[in-house]
């Protein structure tokens, strides 16, 4: 019967096996060559920066593949770099205040300022961000930022109450105030509560003692100390009604999801987190990394950053903001990234209500961390 | 006539069988333990560990009040977890050992093993839905006009997490311990006038003592070293020693100081395990 002699895909004849096997074997060099052309870029960053919503388009267009390693906190980042051989990380996303230490330790390459369009920055400070330049040489490029202030559940705290950090002490919030488990933003906010304003990081002994006292007085209100996931969950399920140490980078994700939460910069002032890209010392992929940083500063890159699934950030370029207003007006309005809005983050900076996150000037990070452990145990 | 005492010599055959476990323990337990001890004397410079022999980490950690607060809290919570798990598990283990058929016992043990198929972290996160103020328990209590009660981010939450980790294991170990008891001894006690509860207390528990103490020891060890429950269900409020280790490494990469905490934990566990095993294998009547 003819059908018995006919081979099919499921029942290939010996001739078929040889034919397709040979073809596959012959094509292997081309396949492996195509694979070899994909450049792997080792990235060290906060969670989310190496995910497809941010790097996917760039990867496809440039035949590269990002291999992210995520950290939480500048100390953690410095430790990971210190324990790795030079050249391990091609691109490093650093918190703005830690760039200086990266540079001092020789962990990052010098950048050519001409490669980046600083004229397009929304604020002059972003062109010469503290610590990003040393002796007239550029070492890091700021790509996004966000503001920290009072984050709260609208059903428990009114918008008016949220205008001051004092709302954390509201009797009804006893056991309902959460902390993002990192000393720097929470203690920074306590310093602002004490009226230290622009000098919030530069505390003499008396001011430092006062900040510790204010922080300790908040302890009965504290309901828990959380990492990113815990912060997210506790606000979402209503366990925590207010959160110290965070901002729209967490509540923004929840708000878009319909949760009754918000973040505001209170009258005592807010803190800015700043994220900047650096090229790792000894990286052999500096050209493509430079291209990626340029991409993240481009209007499309800035929109991706503003819409980032893990946590949103503000666009920092004029063109980026304009594109965000074109393609996602709702998000631009939600975050005040529209010229003339009263909560426009750039306006807040210009009004002096925002202070860039920094490291303690008169104490060591260790002192702050020690006190943080003491506070958690109180 | 007595046979001449066999001269002790190197027994290659016996050694061949012993060697894997010895090598395993040396490589994966003794070696890392010694390294951890050595690390506790190192120093950190520019976020990098430098080999040294300094006591500064010990002085600093043991000199901090919060370290001892964490220590006592961890010890207390682990002890409470052990007591609660042992008390809750015992009736279940007793029923499985004495009151059900072999078939039911097999199925019950199989069901008790199933939780270990899934990640402990995932099981812990599942409690969010149950313990939250808007969760299942409070919703039920709401129908009865009660609550809501705060259960997450409390010591109760931590204890629930510890039970998630240890209770199935404790039930299994207790069941095995009780299953080895000769039931005729229990019947004899009852025939001689011993009431059921007294028989459990005076016959069953003493006969299963070794297994029960080992179950309690496992529960204590797992609870004492657990990071997940106190962090995610207890809200790190206040932190236990495993959380303190994480906090210490996060800030300034102080692995040597974290090693101090870890060494103290290990010493505590050695002491508890030694005391427990001594009690477990002590013969009756001997002091």
Image: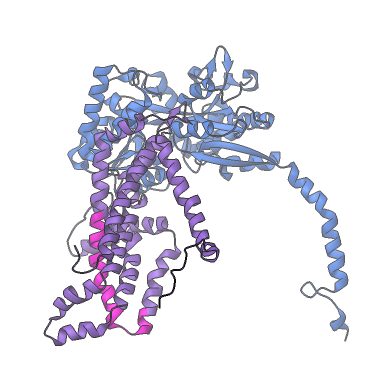
Chain colours: A blue, B purple
Task: Give the residue drawn at x 29%, y 73%.
Answer: B93
Is residue A303 depicted above or below A345 in this figure? Answer: below
Farthest residue, direction top: A135
Farthest residue, direction left: B193
Residue B250 visible, this angle: no
Residue B103 is a magenta residue: yes
For the magenta stretch, what is the residue range? Answer: B79-105
Residue A375 is a magenta residue: no
Q: Main secondary structure of the magenta part?
A: helix
Q: Which of the 4 quarters of the picture holds residue B216? A: bottom left
Task: Give the residue drawn at x 12%, y 81%.
Answer: B195
In this view of the protein, which residue sits in the foreground, B156 or B15? B15
Q: Position of residue B65 (x, y in %)?
A: 24, 35
Residue B180 visible, this angle: yes
Q: Position of residue B165 (x, y in %)?
A: 35, 60
In this view of the protein, which residue sits in the foreground, B30 or A61? B30
Task: Give the residue drawn at x 64%, y 28%.
Answer: A282
Q: Position of residue B95 (x, y in %)?
A: 27, 78
User: Taking B157 as reference, is A340 left or right?
Assistant: right
Label count reads 0
In this view of the protein, which residue sits in the foreground, A47 or B74? B74
User: Taking B72 as reference, is A3 left or right?
Assistant: right
């Amino acid at each position: 019967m003819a059908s018995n002699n006919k081979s099919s895909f499921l029942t290939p004849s010996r001739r078929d096996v040889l034919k397709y096997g040979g073809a596959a074997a012959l094509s292997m060099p081309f396949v492996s060559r195509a694979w070899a052309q994909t450049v792997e870029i080792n990235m060290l960053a906060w969670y989310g920066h190496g995910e497809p919503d941010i790097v996917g388009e760039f990867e496809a267009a440039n035949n590269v593949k990002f291999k992210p390693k995520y950290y939480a906190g500048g100390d953690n980042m410095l430790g990971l770099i210190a324990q790795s051989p030079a050249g391990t990380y091609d691109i490093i996303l650093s918190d703005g205040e830690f760039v200086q230490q990266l540079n001092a330790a020789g962990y990052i390459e010098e950048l050519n300022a001409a490669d980046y369009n600083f004229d397009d920055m929304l604020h002059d400070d972003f062109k010469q961000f503290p610590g990003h330049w040393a002796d007239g040489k550029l070492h890091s490029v700021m790509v996004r930022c966000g503001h920290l202030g009072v984050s709260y559940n609208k059903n428990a705290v009114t918008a008016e109450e949220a205008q001051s950090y004092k709302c954390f002490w509201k009797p009804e919030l006893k056991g309902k105030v959460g902390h993002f488990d990192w000393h720097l933003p929470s203690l920074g906010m306590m310093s602002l509560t004490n009226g230290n304003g622009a000098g919030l990081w530069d505390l003499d002994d008396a001011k430092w003692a006062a900040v510790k006292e204010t922080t300790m007085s908040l302890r009965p209100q504290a309901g828990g100390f959380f990492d990113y996931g815990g912060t997210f969950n506790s606000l979402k399920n209503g366990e925590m009604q207010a959160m110290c140490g965070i901002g729209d980078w967490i509540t923004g994700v929840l708000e878009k999801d319909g949760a009754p939460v918000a973040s505001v910069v209170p009258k005592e002032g807010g803190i800015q987190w700043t994220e900047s890209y650096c090229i790792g010392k000894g990286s052999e992929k500096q050209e493509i990394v430079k291209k990626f940083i340029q991409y993240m500063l481009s209007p499309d890159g800035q929109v991706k950053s503003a819409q980032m699934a893990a946590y949103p950030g503000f666009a920092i370029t004029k063109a980026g903001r304009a594109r965000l207003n074109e393609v996602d007006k709702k998000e631009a309005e939600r975050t005040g990234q529209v010229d003339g809005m009263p909560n426009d983050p750039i306006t807040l900076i210009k009004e002096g209500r925002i202070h860039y996150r920094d490291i303690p000037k008169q104490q060591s990070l260790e002192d702050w961390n020690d006190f943080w452990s003491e506070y958690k145990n109180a | 006539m007595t046979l001449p005492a066999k001269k002790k010599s190197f027994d290659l055959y016996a050694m061949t069988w012993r060697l894997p476990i010895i090598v395993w323990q040396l490589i994966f337990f003794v070696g890392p333990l010694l390294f951890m001890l050595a690390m506790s004397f190192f120093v950190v410079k520019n976020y990098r560990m430098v080999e040294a022999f300094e006591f500064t980490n010990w002085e600093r950690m043991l000199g901090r009040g919060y370290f001892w607060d964490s220590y006592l809290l961890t010890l207390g919570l682990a002890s409470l977890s052990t007591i609660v798990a042992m008390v809750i598990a015992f009736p279940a283990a007793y029923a499985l050992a004495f009151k059900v058929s072999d078939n039911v016992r097999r199925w019950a043990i199989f069901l008790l093993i199933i939780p270990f198929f899934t990640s402990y972290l995932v099981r812990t996160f599942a409690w969010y839905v149950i313990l939250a103020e808007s969760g299942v328990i409070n919703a039920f209590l709401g129908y009865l006009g009660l609550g809501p009660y705060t259960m997450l981010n409390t010591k109760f939450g931590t204890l629930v997490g510890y039970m998630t980790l240890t209770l199935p294991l404790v039930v299994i170990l207790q069941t095995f311990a009780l299953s080895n008891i000769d039931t005729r001894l229990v019947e004899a006690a009852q025939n001689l006038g011993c009431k059921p509860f007294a028989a459990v207390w005076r016959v069953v528990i003493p006969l299963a003592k070794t297994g029960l103490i080992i179950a309690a020891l496992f529960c204590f060890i797992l609870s004492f070293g657990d990071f997940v429950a106190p962090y995610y269900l207890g809200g790190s409020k206040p932190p236990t020693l495993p959380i303190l280790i994480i906090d210490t490494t996060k800030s300034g990469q102080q692995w040597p100081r974290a090693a101090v905490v870890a060494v103290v934990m290990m010493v505590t566990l050695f002491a508890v395990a030694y005391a427990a095993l001594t009690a477990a294998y002590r013969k009756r009547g001997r002091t």
